[in-house]
Image: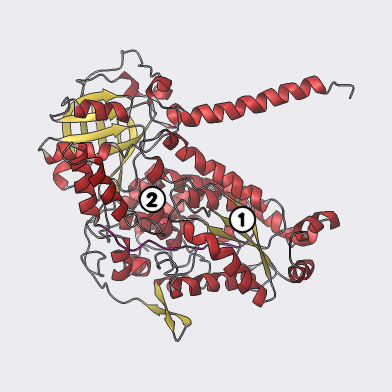
Amino acid sequence: MHSVIQQVTDRIRERSAALRTDYVARMQAQAAAGRPRGTLACGNLAHVLAACPHSQKNTLMDMTRVNVAIVTAYNDMLSAHQPYQQYPDQIKAVLAAEGHSAQVAGGVPAMCDGVTQGQAGMDLSLFSRDVIAQATAVSLSHNAFDATLLLGICDKIAPGQLIGALSFGHLPAAFVPAGPMSTGISNDEKVRIRQKYAAGELDKTALQEMENQAYHSPGTCTFYGTANTNQLVFEAMGLMLPGSAFIPPDSELRHALTDEVAALMPTLVSGSTNYRPLYQLVDEKSLVNGLVALLASGGSTNHTMHMVAVARAAGIILTWDDFRDLSDVVPLLAKVYPNGPADINAFHQAGGVPLLLRGLASRGMLHMDATPLTGNMQDYLQHPSLDNSKLCWTPVTQSQDPAVLSDDEQVFSATGGLKVLSGNLGRCVIKVSAVAKEHHYIEAEAVIFDSQHDVEKAYKAGELNRDAIIVVRFNGPAANGMPELHKLMPILGNLQKAGHKVALVTDGRLSGASGKIPAAIHVTPEAAKGGPLAQLQTGDRIRLDATSGTLHVLDDIRQRPLAQSDLKSQHFGLGRELFGAFRHIVTSAEQGASILFSDND
């Protein structure tokens, strides 16, 4: 084991000892209560049975049989989740044939960041993760289930489901992927068209035609954004079947893998010889394996938030220092857009997750003694295939395309895809895997904005044709829900293409697909909480150095008053407004209840 990987793992374990002990004790107490369905009163169980066909009622009343909860993010608007429509019936049929049962325990919202980019709905994006976590926990709270299958893929959805499932971590749980759509227009061509439209060189009809070619069928988007990063990281953590993340939707192999994971679940439940509850799968070793795979693949910056939240749900404390120290030693082994021209289908064809993990294992960078969903971590270095319609796995050997996925000797970079920057403007993260070396350092005057829409207006007015560090503040969680600022990328890309040195500094965040522009994001403390960004003025000189890991303002801003931002006037704050309205309704209801019921009632 690489010494730094082990050191990071050890310190995570040490700092988390009390919290993890408490979490594990709660999960063990839940497990000790016995198989959940057997603890239900007769009336409780009758409600569980009421809508079931007669044969399923008999199965559910037999406490030796297993009932699997399906928590689904299906909707037919979101391409990645549309394939899930038929999954519950398929899963139920597999389990029924084995004498067991499955029920759709609940659904979770599945908003699409691709639809809400640059729109008011994006204010709800990060909020939705916690709603999804709560919805997952509510789905499992009926206490009628012995195991959990999670049908979710995209940005906040899969992390939210995992966070919720960890509250019932005494149950075995697995993710059931659906796979990416087929390759459409190239990602480089997509960026070219978007930049030409931003520059006013193409009309909206041309832009729409291109977008329709890029997003054209069921399945995840094919770039390596947050959705596909979820799939890669969770496979590396052993939370799905080996090699299953990127098998195409509706293929024979995809159907076989779904059958296989459904049939696997009854063998993992409490009382079986192979009991594997979720709380045992998600520990410090599997989390570090996930982080290492994230960094080696140049994955989404959103996981600097999601993985911290997932870890905390499992009683484990991750910090950005862990990301930083791992990134210093984990090499970049994949070149998938935005880190290169290839898409996720090309990555899978080159060897996919199993080959990536093999390359990391050979370098001593994976905990091969971590506990995955099935078998051991050595099994996760294998590809699934069909042999006369029978599912089998074969060890991966070498890259089928070394320009996309490295072999044992090659690396695309000696360090990982993410960096943590620190300085007198706070701390932040930057994705460097797609940023050319000559753009890792920039010193320029700041141009201050409180809205990405105002940046767009300034660009169209010709006010940004110079070297500049664009600062977009008051876009953190406390301000407006921390929307993705992807609308900025074509604009800044055009400025860079014109020869200007440009960078972005923000307390907001970006799509996992953003890359070529040096972007210091998630700046903390955020402006709305009195962070230094609120003291900046246009003209201040800022130095961003991704090589040394620093972010500094070179002017003395300490005595300046804090700027304020009127978010409502900027068409922002939908998330805060809606959640504020919900809180007001609940508070009003509580006040009404206090009037209706006196102390004497």
| Residue under the image location 63 percent in, 49 percent down | 137
Magenta range is 170-185
Q: Position of residue 497 (x, y in %)?
A: 13, 41
Taking the image as shown, residue 545 lies to the left or right of residue 272, namely left
Q: Residue 213: give x, y in percent of width and height.
A: 29, 55
Could you tell me the amino acid type at mark 1?
Answer: Gly
Q: Residue 357, percent across and down? A: 36, 66
Report the side of 558 relative to 410 (left or right).
Answer: right
Q: Position of residue 40 (x, y in %)?
A: 80, 56
* 369 or 203, nearer to the observer: 203
Q: Nearer the N terminus, badge 2 or badge 1?
A: 1
Disc 2, SS:
helix
Query: Which image quarter holds the C terminus?
Result: top right
Q: CA distance from mark 2 to mark 1?
A: 24 Å
Residue at numbered disc 2: 226
The residue located at (39%, 63%) in the rendering is 366
Q: Could you say which is closer to the camera, residue 404 or residue 237?
A: 404
Classify residue 587 as left or right of residue 463: right
Question: Toward the viewer: 571 or 27?
Answer: 571
In this view, the residue farthest toward the left is 499
Does residue 372 lie above or below 542 as drawn?
Answer: below
Q: Say which element carries label 1.
A: loop
Q: Disc number at residue 169?
A: 1
Q: What secondary structure is the magenta-colored segment mainly?
A: loop
Q: Residues within 10 Å of mark 2 (few under 14, many from 20)?
A: many
